[in-house]
Image: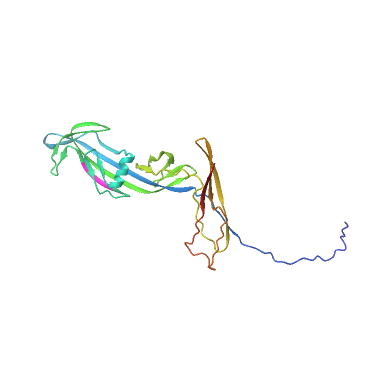
Amino acid sequence: MTLSLTDVGKCKFTDSPPQTERVNIYLLQPAEVSHLHDIECKIFINRHIQHCGMHSHTSAVLYGRREYYLSMDYEKCKKMHETNSVWLFDRIPFNELQMNTTNHRQAVLAGSQSMSGECQPGTYSDVYGTWSGVVVDALFKITISEYEAALNKKTNQVVLSSGTRCDSEKRSCVTSEGATAYWSEIPKNSYLMNQCYKISAPPEDSSYAGVSQQVKEQICGNSLVNEHVCARQAIVARNRDPEGVKPGSQIDLLYSEQSKV
């Protein structure tokens, strides 16, 4: 091939404008956060012990003031939610407790007192000690609440409304605010791709890419393969409104679960 640097002909260029095409692509992916039903119970006690002496004279006693949270097991907490009431110290009932708020109550735990200042002594015991010849009164702050707590599947943590993060497998924990929280059992496949986001339909044709995951399990000596699929096939959303999709328009994504041995 020979190239001439002195005798150069005219170059012909084809003036064709570039063509552009807008394509909306939406990626479907599993939701990393789901929700669990959570119930919480909190009983805060501020108790005051005084010695009841002759002629109803009262005086301070050692360790007479104490503030603490009462421990709460699941059955007792569940019953509080079902009845909106609680029975404390085997003899003190508190009824008509309001949900998702703090209920204030007060009671005499030992001995007796009158509005005129007279007292009758009694004996009182708790985890902090035993006192005799005393009168004991207490203020209670009782909170029962329920809501949908966030489950982070990636970190295996339940995120409570107080911001406390707990190991989801333990099913309960004490929050940073002193409440005891219990949440519902986690479904066996909740950590798999069984939940997809809802994607709002775009104003023109769009293609959706599906995702799936296979998980192997050993059951009774057999190898079971669960295939979890989000949007098994391509979905094309067509919008007939030339002005675009109206707010609130959504496409529910497909979900299927297949098992094979």
Q: Is residue 113 left or right of residue 148?
A: left
Give x and y (percent) for residue 162: 39, 46
x and y, in percent, of residue 30 in the image: 52, 49
Q: Is residue 83 above or below residue 15?
A: above
Quadrant in which residue 171 is drawn: top left
Q: Is residue 97 left or right of residue 182?
A: left
What kind of secondary structure does the magenta stretch mostly adopt? strand
User: Which quadrant of the rendered structure holds the N terminus?
Assistant: bottom right
Place of residue 193 in the rendered image (x, y in percent of width and height, measured from the top left): 51, 47
Q: In the rendered view, tell whether residue 124 sits above or below residue 27.
A: above
At x 28%, y 39%, the residue is 67
Q: Is residue 85 left or right of residue 167?
A: left
The residue depicted at 23 percent of the width and 31 percent of the height is 130
| Residue at the left extreme of this rendering | 55
Which colour style is shown? rainbow
Does 177 sit above or below residue 124?
A: below
Vertical relation: 99 (above or below) 11: above
Which of the image's four quarters has the C terminus? top right
Which quadrant of the figure has residue 186? top left
- Residue 245 on image: x %, y %: 51, 64
Total of numbered circles in the picture?
A: 0
Report which quarter residue 55 is drawn in: top left
The structure residue drawn at horizontal position 27% and vertical position 47%, both measured from the top left corner, is 83
142 inside magenta stretch: no
* Stretch of the chain drawn in magenta: 103-107
Q: Is residue 54 left or right of residue 172?
A: left
The residue nearer to you, when weighing 27 against 18, is 27
